[in-house]
Image (cartoon, grey):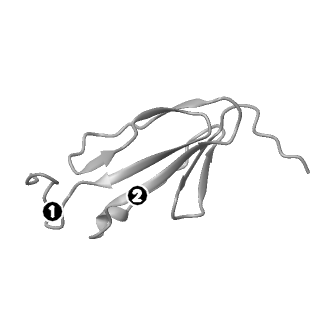
Amino acid sequence: MYVEPFGKPRLMVSRTDDDRILVKNYGVCESLEIRDFLYAGNREVIIEVANDGEGSFLCEIEAEPCKWLKLEMSSREVKDQEILKLICCLGSSGELSGGKSG
């Protein structure tokens, strides 16, 4: 058996702690719902953004301004794989890291 990459760039997204993989070929994108930050103690989620095809694509993360959430990647050219970290900036008492929330 011989496996070749998809003939053009193809977006694949997954969490590092889950086997589920979202693939974008065409049409409407699948959603990756992240509920981790609803629970105390969850500080970071790591997402793998990969290209399962040939070439590369520009990955841009768009989000409403949010004081308690930090994205370590907002825009990057993806040739093989990139890592996106979502980091909760709230302290254990509900304060923003380095100051009070609100």
Q: Amino acid at mark 2?
A: Val
Q: Residues within 10 Å of mark 1 (few under 14, many from 20)?
A: few
Q: Nearer the viewer, residue 21 or 17?
A: 17
Report, in whole angstroms, how far the alpha carbon at label 1 lies from the one at label 2. Answer: 18 Å
Q: Nearer the viewer, residue 30 or 92?
A: 92
User: Is 100 situated left or right of 43 in this image?
Assistant: left
Q: Amino acid at mark 1?
A: Gly
Q: Residues within 10 Å of mark 2 (few under 14, many from 20)?
A: some
Residue 31 visible? The answer is no
| Relative height, residue 1 to residue 65 (above, below) | below
Q: Are marks 1 and 2 in contact (CB under 8 Å)?
A: no
Q: Which residue is mark 1?
A: 94
| Relative height, residue 64 to residue 69 (above, below) | above
Residue name at image x 54 percent, y 64 percent: 18
Q: Which residue is mark 2?
A: 45
User: Is 31 situated left or right of 102 in this image?
Assistant: right
Indicate the position of residue 1 as horizontal and vertical percent values: 91, 51
Give the quarter of the image for residue 56.
top right
Indicate the position of residue 72 as horizontal and vertical percent values: 36, 43
Indicate the position of residue 6 as horizontal and vertical percent values: 75, 38
Residue name at image x 36 percent, y 59 percent: 44
Q: Secondary structure at mark 1?
A: loop
